[in-house]
Amino acid sequence: MNSTIESKKIVFDKNKVADFYPTLRKRVDEYFSKHNLSTHANAAMVFKTVFVLGIFIASYVLVIIGILPLWAMLISILIHGFFTALVGFNISHDAVHGSYSSNVRLNKILGTTFNFAGTSDYIWKIKHNIVHHTFTNIPDHDDDIDQIGLIRIEQSRKLKWYHRYQHYYIFVLYCFTTVVWVFVNDYKNFFRKKWGYYENNKHPKGAFLRIISYKAIYYFCYLVLPFLIMNIAWYWIIVGFVAMHAIQGLTLAIVFQLAHVVEGAAFPTLDENDKVENNWAVHQLYTTVDFARNSSLVRFLVGGLNFQVEHHLFPKICHIHYKKIAPIVKQTAEEFNLPYLESKTFGGALLSHIRLMRKLGREESFA
C-alpha cells in the first residue's frame, strides 16, 4: 500500500500485530479457492450493474424528452439523483479500485461512469484510492475528514460557537456535496500540491484536458441540453438540477460518514516521528466501521460500502463478496484481540453519527 505514496514521511508500525493481515489474507484466499470463486464480479453483480445503469439512464431520458407533467418530472429527476449515487457506489467505485473485473480495460470503461455523475474518475482515484485508503481518518492527511470550517469532524479542529448546532445543519450541507465536486473541487484538487504528505504534482500529460472534456459533456447534458429542448420555464431546470444534486449529495455523504465518522471510530494522530501507532491493516480496523450488515436492501443499494471494514482491507475484491468474507474478517480480528467495529442497523449508525457530531460541536476534547 505504501508503495503508491510519493512521500515516505508517514510510517506505519509494521511490528504491531504483524501476523494479523497475513493470516487474514490467507484465510480469505482459501475461501475463494475452496469455493472456486473469482474475486471479481459475478452474475449477481452484472444484474445489479444493468439494473442500476438502466434506471439511471431511463430516469434521465424521461426528464429530458419532456413528456411527463411537471410533478412527475420532478420525481423522475429525484430518482435520477439517487441512482446517480448508486452508480457511484455500485459500479464506478469498484471499477476505479480495479475490483469489478480482472480485465483492466473493462474497469477503465466502467470507471468513466464517475464522470457522468459529474465528478472526475482521475481525481477520485487519487483522493480516495490513494489518500483516503492509506491515511484513513488521520487529521490533515485524509481528505474525507478535511471538511469546511462549518463542520468539526475531529478533535484537532478548533471548536467554534456555531459547531454547537452542527448536528442540525450538517444534513443541509451534505446536500451540496456533489454540486461542489462538479464545479469546484475537481479543479481545485488537480492543482493542489499536497494532501498531507502525499505529493500531488506528477499528473500524466493530458490528464487535465481529459477532466475538462468530461466536465464539458456533463455540463452540456445537464445544463445546456435541457435549455435547448425542454419546453419548461428556465427556473424549473435550475430547480431540478439543484434537487437532483441535493439527493445525490446527501446520499453519498451519509453513506461515507456512517463508515468513518461515528462513535467508536478512531482519528489517530501521528507521533513526533510522523509514525502511526499501528500497521496499515490494524489501522483500518480502528478507523473503519461496518453498518447494517444483515440488511439485504442496504447492501444492494450502497454497493457493499456498509461492509467498510472488508472494503478497506480488501479493496481489490468486488463488493458482491463482502458479506461472505465478513465473518472471516470478524473472527480473525477477535482472535488477535483487535476491534471489529459495527453498527447493527442503518438507523443506529445514523444516530451514532449525529451523537458524535453533537459531541464534537460542544466539547473541546473527550476520550
Image: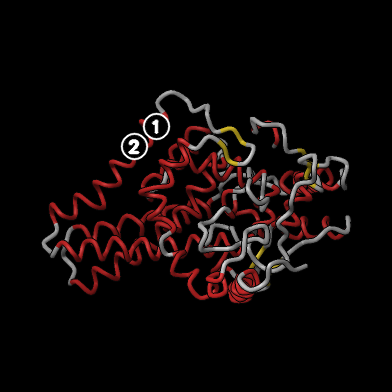
Closer to the camera in the image, 359 or 133: 359
Q: Is residue 349 above or below residue 7?
A: below
Count of labels in the image = 2
Say the numbered circle drawn on residue 208.
1
Instruction: For the N terminus, give its image quadrant.
Output: top right
Kind of residue sitting beneath label 2: Ile
Instruction: For the C terminus, give its image quadrant.
Output: bottom right
* In-image side of 82 versus 141 (left or right): left
Say the numbered circle drawn on residue 25.
none
Disc 2 on helix, strand or loop? helix
Closer to the camera in the image, 248 or 80: 248
Q: Which residue corresponds to mark 2?
A: 212
- Residue at 56% x, 45% y is 128
Name the quadrant containing residue 322.
bottom right
- Image coordinates for residue 255, horizontal then vertical, percent: 54, 63
- Image coordinates for residue 184, horizontal then vertical, percent: 39, 47
- Image coordinates for residue 93, horizontal then vertical, percent: 52, 48
